[in-house]
Amino acid sequence: MVQGFAPNDLTTADWMSRRAGQTTLVAANSSENLTPATGQRSESMSWTQISCALYLPRELMGFAEGTGLFWLAGMANGVRFFAPPYWKIETCAECAAPNPYYEARDEC
């Protein structure tokens, strides 16, 4: 299993983006033509499919705290997950030993 939270550098963000895979988007194309001699105007609209990254590197770098992607062996695309810090989960915080390196301060 490979797991990654929000990256802080472009190298990691680019790797995670490429590892997450591709998706297909539908893009609209429109055109308008005017024939000067006749003054006739024509419009057309078409749709096309384009391939793009499932997650762009800048999107990965903007993931909220606790959000990330993981991949299991044999899995083509990553799965987005949310894992809140254990101290923010009430049942976990009750069981956790106090952090000897952190001193809680009263807020005024």
Image: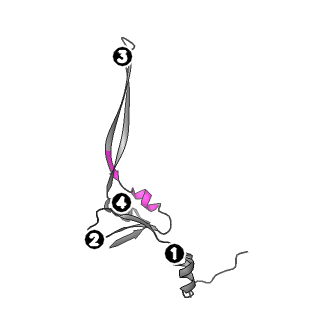
Q: Tag on residue 54?
A: none
Q: Quadrant of the C terminus?
A: bottom right
Q: Which residues are magenta?
A: 50-61
Q: What's under tag 1, amino acid-wise?
A: Pro
Q: Secondary structure at mark 2?
A: loop
Query: Of all residues shown, which one is farthest toward the front?
Result: 91
Where residue 23 sits in the image (x, y, percent)? Answer: 33, 52
Whether residue 58 appears in magenta in the rendering, the answer is yes
Where residue 107 sits in the image (x, y, percent)? Answer: 70, 75
Up-down: is 105 above or below 43?
below
Q: Residue at x 50, y 72 (%)?
A: 84
Where residue 12 sits in the image (x, y, percent)? Answer: 37, 65
The mark nearer the N terminus, 1 or 2, is: 2
Q: Tag on residue 35?
A: 3
Query: Of all residues shown, which one is farthest toward the top?
Result: 37
Q: What's under tag 4, amino acid-wise?
A: Ser
Q: Tag on residue 73?
A: 2
